[in-house]
Image (cartoon, helix red, strand yellow):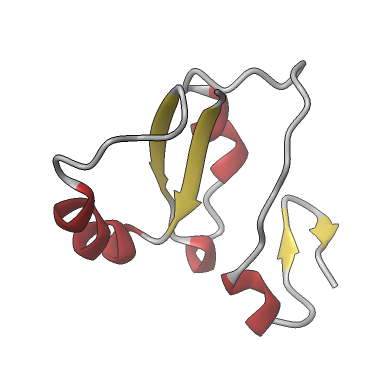
Amino acid sequence: SAMQPEVDLPILFQDKEPLLEGETLSVQSRTVVPTDFSSGEDWSVKLQNTDFDPTQPTVWLLEGLMMHPGLVLNGFNMF
């Protein structure tokens, strides 16, 4: 099993967390990283302040970002 960080908008976590309460995780741990991408805040700093280990292999799912062509996150043009 693996650690699962979840970086998303704070408002989405407000809706999602009550739905997940009491559910059994199929991952070692799940860490919520609420981030307002439109504010320019550095979500990578927030992620580094969790139990995320950048030396371990990772898989990234960029679900919502697909709706924002030309999006730039931390200087990296996503599309």
Find residue 14 and report its image quarter: bottom left
Location of residue 9 (image quadrant): bottom left
Decide: is 59 above or below 31: below
Q: Residue at x 49, y 18 (%)?
A: 51
| Residue 11, position as x, y percentages in the image | 28, 65
Identify which residue is drawn at 32% across, 65% down: 12
Given residues 23 and 43, the one toward you in this image is: 23
Q: Tell whether 48 sits left or right of 27.
A: right
Name the spot of residue 23 as percent of width and height, x first. 22, 42
Q: Where does the N terminus fall, quadrant-wise?
A: top right
Question: Which residue is at 49% across, 49% downward?
Answer: 7
> Looking at this view, is 35 or 12 the one in front?
12
Quadrant position of the C terminus in the picture: bottom right
Query: Which residue is at the front of the view, 23 or 44?
Result: 23
Most foreground residue, 59 or 45: 59
- Classify 71 as above or below 52: below
Q: How many marks?
A: 0
Residue 60 is situated, as x and y percent measured from the top left of the image, at 70, 48
User: Quick check: 23 left or right of 37?
Assistant: left
In this rendering, would 36 be left or right of 23?
right
49 shown above or below 63? above
Residue name at image x 44 percent, y 60 percent: 36
